[in-house]
Image (cartoon, grey):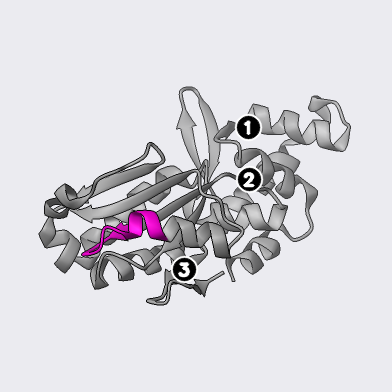
Amino acid sequence: MAEGKVRRVIGGVEARRIILRNLLDGPQTGLVLRAAIARRVSKPVDEVSDAMLYFNLQHLENNGLIERFRDGKEKAARLVPHEIQSVRRVLGVTAPVAYIGAVGEDPGVLHAVPKRIRAETSFRPEKYHYFIEETARRRVSGLTPDKVLHEVPEDIFVHDLGKMYELVYRLSQDLIREYAILVDVTGGGKVCALALYQLAIEFDLPCIFVTELGTVSWMRR
């Protein structure tokens, strides 16, 4: 489990927990992170040494949990997208839920699947994101503001796993910083299902499949 990796990298070091917890709120500069550590350990900011801050930042970066970048004149840090959900779990941080799935031959999944999720799981998504083949869009009606369609050319949606994965990855990279993601491989055909399941594995996300009987089956929790 990716959570095991996060725990090993933290290694019981409080400064690392503080850094990761603050980065869940978005990118932060070294100055902001130093102040956050100072508050948590009840020390003046000038008593938080460079070693305490930058050694631990380097450790988190070397182990793939964060990345550092130039923000104007200052250097800042942010969490690596595919580690965010694991960091949340380890630190006990909750986030609003976003759903990612697909619409295939049966557009009824737009309405049926959310009902099953609410009935059989503890998840209450605020947004539902569906990938749909472009020509199938005209069959969909009755959309509500919480449901977002992402139209995909047929040659990708049906035949190109690599490019389909790029699309679901790009969406998740944006969503994961604000939302906990629930993946659904019920609709959309084989290529979409494989891309979504690959996403669930890489981002350590819960993944469901709604059976023909209408029950929720867990692929990953």
Q: Name the residue rendered at 62%, 66% in the picture.
A: 5
Is disc 1 surrounded by few (<14), some (14 to 19) or many (20+) residues within 10 Å?
A: some
Which disc is residue 208 wearing?
A: 3
Between tags 1 and 3, which lies in front? 3
| Quarter of the N terminus within the rendering | bottom right
Side of 147 where 44 appears, left or right:
right
| Quarter of the C terminus within the rendering | bottom right
Q: Position of residue 144 (x, y in %)?
A: 36, 39
Q: Position of residue 167 (x, y in %)?
A: 28, 53
Task: Kindly state the secondary structure of the residue where label 3 is placed.
Answer: strand
Q: Name the residue rendered at 22%, 49% in the picture.
A: 140
Find disc 2 in the rendering and name its residue: 57
Q: Earlier in the sequence, mark 1 or mark 3?
A: 1
Which disc is residue 30 wearing?
A: 1
Q: Position of residue 74 (x, y in %)?
A: 53, 26
Which disc is residue 49 wearing?
A: none
Residue type beneath disc 3: Ile
Q: Is residue 176 above or below residue 29?
A: below
Q: Let me know if residue 108 is in the magenta part.
A: yes
> Which residues, given as a range, are shown in magenta?
102-112
Between tags 2 and 3, which lies in front? 3
Task: Kindly state the secondary structure of the residue where label 2 is placed.
Answer: helix
Q: Earlier in the sequence, mark 1 or mark 2?
A: 1
Separation (CA) of disc 1 from disc 2: 9 Å
